[in-house]
Amino acid sequence: MRENDPRYKRNNIRGENVHNRIGGGLMTKAIIFDMDGTLFQTNLILEPALAATFDVLRDKGLWQEDTPIEKYREIMGVPLPVVWETLCPMHSLAIREESNSLFHVKLIEQIRNGKGALYPNAEQTLAALAEHYKLYIASNGQKEYLQAIVDTYQLERFIKGTYSIQSIASGHKSDLVRKVIVENGIQQGAVIGDRSSDIQAAHDNQLLSIGVRFDFAQETELQRADIVIDDLKDLLQVQLA
């Protein structure tokens, strides 16, 4: 579990003390992955799906400005209600919910049409890790969206369970990770993600935090991770056991 060991060097893919946190002993060990910006290259489908959504809003006279793609990139990873409160603060809750539903329809269309992709080395890394650990996904994405990715890339070959933020009332990533831990009897493990909510979820649940320096990651947030990697295959170099 998480320790304050002065010998441990933050952001080091060698992970000198990882053995104490997710290895050793006959314990239930697991790795919990974020989805967007960690396993799945959401950036490939984000702009066309968001553009299509705001085109509809423009047609309805509900939006006159450019599509706020950069603002979305800045807040990527936050719960969906926060997304639409930030992008469209002037809209009613009903309109935000309608926009969110339409946005997810467009995202899923992009996924089903093969417009997205997993990050490089994702499948090989998951296959190798699955031989030794139980793998799970804990994401702020909606169930149907996550299932579309799992189905399209056949991630059920490696992933034991996929958890959406919709499954908990609080909407907090830390609580979602806690749900994964409790339901699966996890005693030791790590959380892999690109944003501060993933890192905080690991720390709140006494798990190792591994940040990925991918599209939506921010250096100031990654500084709080125990380890930072630039390629998913780097996980195989970490001494997980």
Image: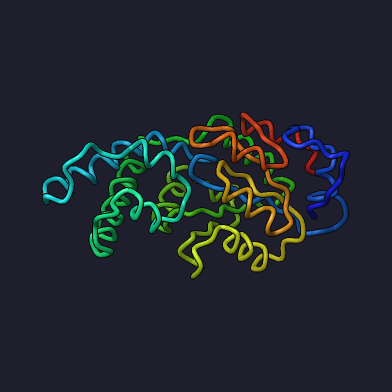
Residue 173 on image: x %, y %:
56, 57
| Nearer to us in this view, 229 or 137 | 229
Residue found at x 38% / y 58%: 81
Residue 221 on image: x %, y %:
59, 41
Residue found at the far bottom of this picture: 169
Residue 114 picture quarter: top left
The quadrant of the image that shows the N terminus is bottom right
Left/right placement of residue 48 relative to residue 158 reads left
Left/right placement of residue 210 relative to residue 80 reads right
Residue 172 on image: x %, y %:
53, 61
Image position of 153 with respect to 161: above or below: above
| Nearer to us in this view, 149 or 178 | 178
Count of numbered tags: 0
Left/right placement of residue 175 relative to residue 97 reads right
The quadrant of the image that shows the C terminus is top right
Residue found at x 18% / y 46%: 63
Residue found at x 62% / y 29%: 230
Left/right placement of residue 234 relative to residue 158 reads right
Residue 52 on image: x %, y %:
23, 42
| Nearer to us in this view, 25 or 7 | 7
